[in-house]
Image: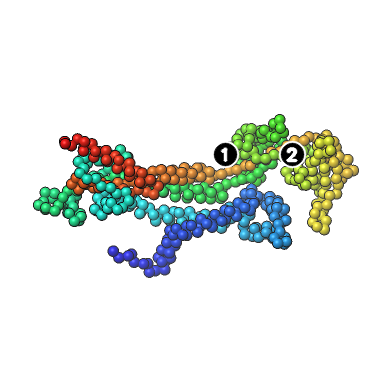
Amino acid sequence: MRPAPRPTDPASRLATAVWRTLTDVRFAVLQIIVLAVAGLIGTMIRQIPAYALRNNPIGYATELADLHRRYDPITILGANVGPGLVGIFETLGFLRIFTAPWFSFLLTLLVVSIVICTLDRLPRLWRGMREVRPIQPAAFFDLRLSQRAAFAAVEATDEELAAALRGRRFTVRRADEMADAGGVVAGPGLDPGAPDALAQPERHLYGDRNRYFKMATLLTHLGLILFLAGGGVTGAFGYETVLFVGEGQTAPVQPVGTPGNLLVKNLGFDAPRRADGSFADFRTDLAVYRDGRQVARKIIRVNDPLEVDGFVFHQNTFGAAETLDVRDPAGRLVWHGPVLMDDQVLGKPQGFLTVPGSRYGIFVVLDRDAAGAGRLTLLGTDGSTDASGSLVPIFADQLTVGATSDPRLTAGYTVRWTEAGAFTGIVTRRDPGQPIIWVAYLSLISGIVLSFYFPRRRIWLRRTGDRLEVAMLADRYVDADREFGQLLADLSRVTARHAEQRPA
């Protein structure tokens, strides 16, 4: 048989080269290695959260500043390389690997490779499953090969032998033919009664077990494709953010102005403690509103979220939230509400309040005095900075719960610490790729289970006169020696029954 002619036009040659590359196992291994290395880098280097990457320059700058604090002190051989590392990581996209365009391209290429490899393998897989050879030549039963055996003087009927195979869950087929003494297979149309002294009848039995389970590999490939597709859908259309909400406060789930936006309200947060002082639970009484109407309410915990219209609200963290009253120099109330202490300075909780209607902002730092009572430090700023670029405080004062600042020390404003409380941190996530991931999981697990636990076995029985020859082939996941031995034991019992019934 002559090989297929090679394509001559450039387009055909290019298509052939691309097809061969995408079906090459070495290329697939290379893709997996590159993705694994990228994933390892993304695991070792802290990634900027998704909520800070989507139209959130302030959040991005905050995350970048935190990364500088983390990496800037790094030195190698006495040289401070930390500040440059963050810049290099940002340029290479190492701070957002799993959402970077090049990473998405690699995943897409892997999906295309899996699809093409599957299409390339499918015809051969189908032929190997459909095209069976119940009749094998004499050389196939050579006893020097593995899983081969022969019985002499067998008087058992074909149906008894077939029953032994069915007992091992084989599907049995029977084929008859005439073969000459030299082992040349004669055509099926040969007349068994033809006068040929060399002709002798041969009978063949073929058993096949788990024949169609070879197709389970397609489920495995489908699972891999769906996993990657689900991740792509989540990356393109998913949404994730973290909401810090003080007690009694509300916060929009998506950016203000989003049609049909949801609002969450913290109706109450509780973190009860055990006798040893450790926290026993974290729970938030959370209400969700749309267009001013409450659509859901639930007390959420760490492993018991609230689901609303595709959004899932997880209890994630909490912190101090100190309620302040701020009055301007004329005595008008300009602020009443909690200040979220969602940052730290020198290991102490810190928050920031922009005083409405003024040029001032107040840094609020929570501490304790020598007696263990709460103490709030107020540091005011108008945005001016020193030569190093640091903000310059223009006033300062300290308060205890219920106390009011001296307006002479706080730029004419009076600040009263009315209540000590807490805020709740809620991870809000919408994952449209989750159903695809579940289908991918089921497909992948089904394919693996069917491939490993239901491998194919094939058995051939060839009878020439009263001689019985046996051959077996099995997939690599089968303990072929053990199963072949069990089958021979069954066949031996059948032949032994006839030997016992034979008259002495």
Can residue 274 be seen in the rendering of this structure? Answer: yes
Q: Is residue 241 left or right of residue 145?
A: right
Mark 1 or 2: in front is 2
State the separation of the CA atoms marked 1 and 2.
30 Å
Give x and y (percent) for residue 222: 45, 48
Q: How is the image coloured?
A: rainbow
Query: Which residue bears the numbered disc 2?
Result: 320
| Callout 1 amino acid | Asp
5, above or below 496, in the image: below
386, above or below 353, in the image: below
Could you tell me which secondary element the residue under label 1 belongs to? loop
Q: Is residue 492 left or right of residue 24?
A: left
In the picture, the disc for residue 472 is: none
| Callout 2 amino acid | Ala
- View extreme (front): residue: 504
Query: Which residue bears the numbered disc 1?
Result: 309
Q: Earlier in the sequence, mark 1 or mark 2?
A: 1
Residue visible at 64% across and 60% down in the picture: 91
Can residue 166 be seen in the rendering of this structure? Answer: no
- View extreme (left): residue: 195
